[in-house]
Image (cartoon, rainbow, N blue to C red):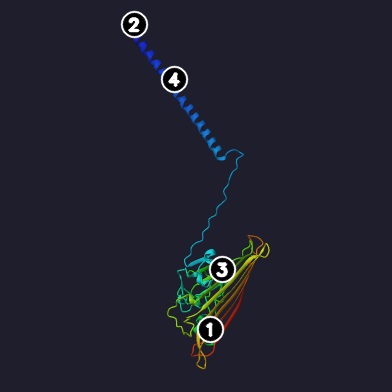
Amino acid sequence: MKRVVLSCLMLLLTAAAAHAQEQAEAGAGGAQRPKAVLEKMEGSKKEAAANATKRTTGDASDKVHKLSVVEVEDARNESGASSIGGQTLRTLPSYSGSITEALKGMSNVQFSNDMLSSHTGGEIKPPRISIAGADPWENSYMIDGMSITNRLNPNGMQDDSAHTSTMLSGADQTIFYDVRLLENINVYTNNIPAKYSGFTGGVVDSRLRDPKMDEWHFEVEGRHTRSKWFSLRGVDENSDSAESQPRFNVNTLSTIAEGLVNDNVGVLLGASRKYSTIPLKRKDNDGNVTDDDQHRISDNFFAKLLLRPNDDMTLLEMALCGLSRVITVTTPVTCGPLYLIDTAGLFSISREI
């Protein structure tokens, strides 16, 4: 009996030892397998990274394309400042081609009712504007930093005020520029920079454009309009006052030439004439009523010289501007002779940079 019991114990001990040995071998194999898997995964990552690098850079013989740096600039929009320029300025529909007429799309600029009147179709003067409720002559007009504001009786622009020798006709500006000669127009209605002065209303600051430096360019423009092409209402056919113009003929001729004098010098030349004939009635001293013509003539010429050694340097800008305005006025039937008003001016702008 004792032998049987001892034999059973020996079998149990032998089985337990074998089981313990199997677990130990299994633990050792499990520790080795994760290490092999990690090594394999690490090799796969390195191979994938090498392939990605090869796809990105290519072979040594492939070209590498680099994009140029793009700079984006934007101007801060300031309250009370408006600007118009470039091709938009030069293609605006306009009957006078003046600076003030180019501002008719700005909400802060108010125009005189004379611009919309059918009674004064023969007038060639630029429309008058009001900024911030001020009178037209209380604005400041600038060209390249030089004032062209008229200080000599600017309120005498109405024809009625020119019926006496002591009330000569004036204008808000001393010279009427063609917008085709301008680069841009800046208008300030409020928050006006401190560099401007001499105004109560607003500031109209224009910049002359540079001549084209690639080749010679020529431009000729002509316009004509007459009262026969319109159906005018409320106009007195026997009018003796320029406030009611039943008949008129208006002609405009202008030309621009610009180009290179040599590789570093460019010139811009411009000239224009506006001529208007306004037939009215006139009573002579002997009581006879005759037909008499009033005339409006405006001549302007412009020249600009530009010295530019290279694209990044401008040494000299010089502009010469001139004007001549002739207005013949027939007095009312109750007054006396005819008046001739002739004004002329010459302006020079030079800037060294």
Q: In the picture, residue 175 is in which quadrant? A: bottom right
Residue type, numbered disc 3: Arg
Q: Are marks 4 and 2 in contact (CB under 8 Å)?
A: no
Q: State the residue position of label 2.
A: 3
Residue type, numbered disc 2: Arg
Residue 180: assigned label: 3
Mark found first going from the N terminus, 4 or 2: 2
- 76 over 340 or under it: above or below: above
> Crowdedness of circle 3 by 10 Å Cα count: few (<14), some, many (20+)?
some
Q: At numbered mark 1, what does the secondary structure look like: helix, strand or loop? A: strand
Q: Nearer the viewer, residue 238 or 110?
A: 238
Residue 162 lies, in percent from the top left, at 52, 85
The mark closer to the camera, 1 or 3, is 1
Residue 160 lies, in percent from the top left, at 49, 84
Q: In the picture, residue 28 is in which quadrant? A: top left
Residue 293: assigned label: 1
Residue 164 lies, in percent from the top left, at 52, 87
- 6 over 261 or under it: above or below: above
Residue 25: assigned label: 4
Q: At numbered mark 2, what does the secondary structure look like: helix, strand or loop? A: helix
The mark closer to the camera, 4 or 2, is 4
